[in-house]
Amino acid sequence: MNKYINSIVFFFKLNMRNPFYLVSLIIILSYLGVIVYSYLSSEITNPGNMLQLSSFFIQGYMLIFMFFGFHTIHIETSDVSKDLFLTIRKGFYIKIGSNISLIVIMNIMFCMFATLVIYTVYQFTGYHFSDLYKKSMLFIFMYWFLPAFISSLIGFVIGLTVHKKFSPAFIVGIWLLISPLNIYFSNQLYKLLGMEHVPGFIHLGISDPKMSYHAFSGFTFTVEDVMNKVIWVITILVIIIVILLLKRNNVKSLLIILSVTALLFSAIPFFFLDSKPNPTDFHKRNIDELNYYALNRYEKPRAEMDYTIKKYEIDLAIEKQLKASVHIQFTEHEKGKKSFSLYHGFRVTSIEDEEGNAINYKQYGDFLDVDLHMPTKEVYLQYSGTSSPYMDANQSFAYLPYYFAWIPLKTEHPSMRYMYNSNHRLPAQPNDLIQYTLKFNGSKNIVTNLKKVEEGTYIGVTNAGVSFMYGELKTKKIGGYNITYPVTWENSMITVDSYLAQIEASFSSIKDVFQLEDSQLLPQNILFIPAVGANDTLASETMWLQEKEQLIILINPYELQNEETFKYKEPFISYQMIGALLWKNNRIVHENEDVPVLFNSLAGAYINKKLGISSSTVSEAEYWTKEISQKTKNEKHKQIIEDAHVFVSNAPAEVVEEFLLKWSHILNDPNVDWGAVENLLNVYTKEG
């Protein structure tokens, strides 16, 4: 052992005489300094981005350690090193082991130093200890330490096999092939070669180096990704051992090593080839979802919904896909064909009645028809699949809200409707008092409107549906409310009191203008969930009231925020809240979506004016009036839109409030059209 330790010290001193090592260490420290400086010097940022956007650092770090590995071989061939180790028993193996160990120690020391620096920055900027710290350490291990270690081993192999004159070209070529920022090129290259799975193994970095930190999922690590890197290490170590044994003509040991390696690799399932979703797949998933609802805009159920659900029992597991077993109990015995709404990404595998008899079913779009030949009071469904990118559920995070058909629901509408170049989520929550039992097979900290009775089991009785969420979230008591928010939004919470006061003011004003029931109160649970979808533009899309349960406010998972973030969001509260309190809370889906959108923008502008709220950005009322008018082809309808805008902007306050109140009443009709708005408008303009 002493010989081994002395050998490491010897090579450390020998390497430190080489300017290349010293310059490389300075470059690495400079890289780290750039990462920290870019975060501290930015007014609006996210602490997770220090690591999430560090692929440029990983790229340089890997190249330096690849040259380190190569350099160790040529240090060994120096006369001083060679003569010294020839005098030591088993000096050849000590020399090889100590060189590899020295590189590993340097890698560990730097990663530990970097971790301490990152932690210090977190503390300095107000982020107290949380899962962010633990996952940051794991990120550095997975995406800094391991790629650098693998790179050093590759450099070691090049040093053993390639002539010194050609080695730099080999090093740079391999580095370009496996470097994190090269994923965009390599994906396309291997697809052209018909080798789509190869990048999943070769790529050692983050799946999408340009994508910012996701506030809901946090840093993501998969078993497949760990397996990928383990296979890399084993493979290169085996190659090194084989080369060394060949150099020493040790055929017997070589055969043993090759046999053991063959057995090891034959026992490993190579599922890690598909371990990483590449950037193209990520964007394609969102585009496919947009296209799906653009092409299936007016889908309707084909069977009856004349049943009442008494109870749900849900067994849920979420890994790469959602897997669910749902037991539905009806109030009465039901017979004949019945329809449910179930998101199209979930595929049903079986449905049985209470006696275990198979029930015929048919899935089409976001609907499921079951054929109950005999009077049936209970059905058992098994299904699995991938949830929507708008309401995702995976190993890292899940957002399955009460208004989404992640369980079979009684609603005649699909989960979403394509409008304004985005997918508008439709209110599909039940309207009946239903008993829920939810069992989750997992170790996540769940956020739900149900009550936890034991580990993994939640129960409740509600007429507002069931929500299920987990991710990088924390809950804190602030201003009398239970506030749930992303752990990386800690600094933004400094000014959340002002935002909560504005929520209360908008809620009170909307309740007063639209004469809502006194029993309708602001929930004590307010959730800031990073689940804003692709192309979301409607303000009303980002707030959902699960009555008497919780207020869900959607925020951008990639949003760069600071202490002023909530002040910036305050002017949008009224626009968000009107739809949440009115038609979405009443489960109304309008055939002509332009009518409620215009109403929302005009009413929101009036509420803000009444509360004395101004925005430095473009007026929502003006923007949506112009947007809807441009979309509308009928000239008469264009005039109605413009007249409504002018009237709400200029009429006396008491007249505007009466007009908006009556407009809200006609919005209770799903088939409301511009003719109804015109009739209402004529009453007030003629009176004027």
Image (cartoon, rainbow, N blue to C red):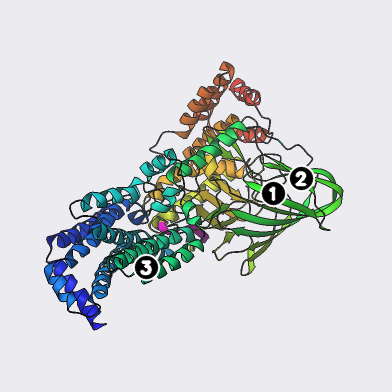
Name which residue lies at 37% across and 46% down.
Answer: 183
* Distance Cα–Cα, label 3 vs label 1: 52 Å
Asked whether residue 40 is drawn in magenta, I would say: no
* Residue 102 occupies quadrant: bottom left
**Image quarter of the C terminus:** top right
Q: CA distance from mark 1 to mark 2?
A: 9 Å
- Position of the N terminus by quadrant: bottom left
Query: Which SS class for mark 1?
Result: strand
Residue that carries the numbered disc 3 in the rendered image: 254
Q: How many marks?
A: 3
Could you tell me which secondary element the residue under label 2 belongs to? strand
Q: Residue at x 42, y 38 (%)?
A: 192
Q: Which image quadrant for residue 326?
A: bottom right
**Residue 490, image x, y percentages:** 40, 59
Q: Which mark is residue 239?
A: none
Task: Provide the residue span drawn in magenta.
Answer: 480-488
Disc 3 or disc 1, which is closer to the eye?
A: 3
Image mark for residue 361: 2
Q: Is residue 542 left or right of residue 498?
A: right
Main secondary structure type of the part rendered in magenta: strand
**Label 1 with label 2: CB-CB less than 8 Å:** yes
Instruction: Return the mark for residue 348.
Output: 1
Instruction: Classify mark 1: residues with Cα within 10 Å, few (<14), some (14-19) or many (20+).
Output: many
